[in-house]
Image (spheres, rainbow, N blue to C red):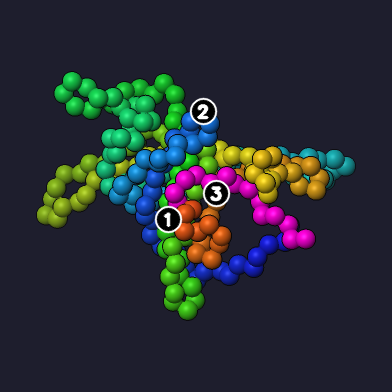
Amino acid sequence: MAGKTRTKAAGYHGVQNMKFAPREAEGYATTPLEMKYAQSINPSALLEAAEQYADDRLVCRIPNDTGYEGEIGTTAADPEIEKAAGFALEGANGLITTDIVSYLRGALYYEYLETDEDGKQSVVKVWMFNVELGKGAATHTTDKNSLEFGSYTYPFRAYGDPLKDAEGTGDYLDERGVGRKAFLYTCRYDDVGYANFDKTVPVPKVAAESP
């Protein structure tokens, strides 16, 4: 499928304005939860391959692309996220961390800065689909001659949503009838809908083909 020509950035940095929209019966929540003070995110592809051999040679490889996993780094635990995720409850004297009975899934949003070769910066907006949040891990160290801040990380895994056709009503199928999954939806300043891309979780659909 032909598309617009995109230029390669000279570099990128930062992460900001992270939020999480829990999955609901009819899709994703329209009012995402803010994940304040995010410090890092590192989506790593979960990609393997099944190999078929015949006649003493490798005849084909079938990719098994199951999404992404990684960690979200923040400055401290987020009580509202942990309550929404189901592993924290309000107790009589504070917040109680409990066991997990089911994993919370939703859509994760974040932004980062991209720099062109001419030095101009722009904000890139990203939605990650069908993300499962895990229980956070804290790090504490004693204060010494210089203070060292603690850190808090949430493991995650992104399973993706079915990629939709140009109308957004049916699943996309390529010319051989094969469907695809959408894991990340990345919108830059010159893309259609950029201004409101962060407001609600978008439907991942392919662009309409030119006549």
Q: CA distance from mark 1 to mark 2?
A: 27 Å
How many other residues sit within 10 Å of disc 3, few (<14), some (14-19) or many (≥20)? many
Query: What element does badge 1 sit on?
Result: strand
Q: Residue furthest right?
A: 55
Magenta residues, as a range?
A: 198-211
Q: Hey, what amino acid is under mark 2?
A: Ala
Locate residue 28 relative to residue 50 in the image: left or right.
left
Give 72 or 26, whichever is nearer the viewer. Answer: 26
User: Is residue 125 inside the magenta stretch?
Assistant: no
In the picture of the structure, the residue carrying the numbered disc 3 is 184
Residue at the image point whose x is 43% and y is 70% from the top:
121
In the picture of the structure, the residue carrying the numbered disc 1 is 111
Residue at the image point whose x is 44% and y is 76% from the top:
119
Residue at the image point whose x is 44% and y is 67% from the top:
122
Q: Which mark is on residue 25?
A: 2
Q: CA distance from mark 3 to mark 2?
A: 21 Å
Point out the tag, 3 or 2, that comes first from the N-terminus.
Answer: 2
Q: Hey, what amino acid is under mark 1?
A: Glu
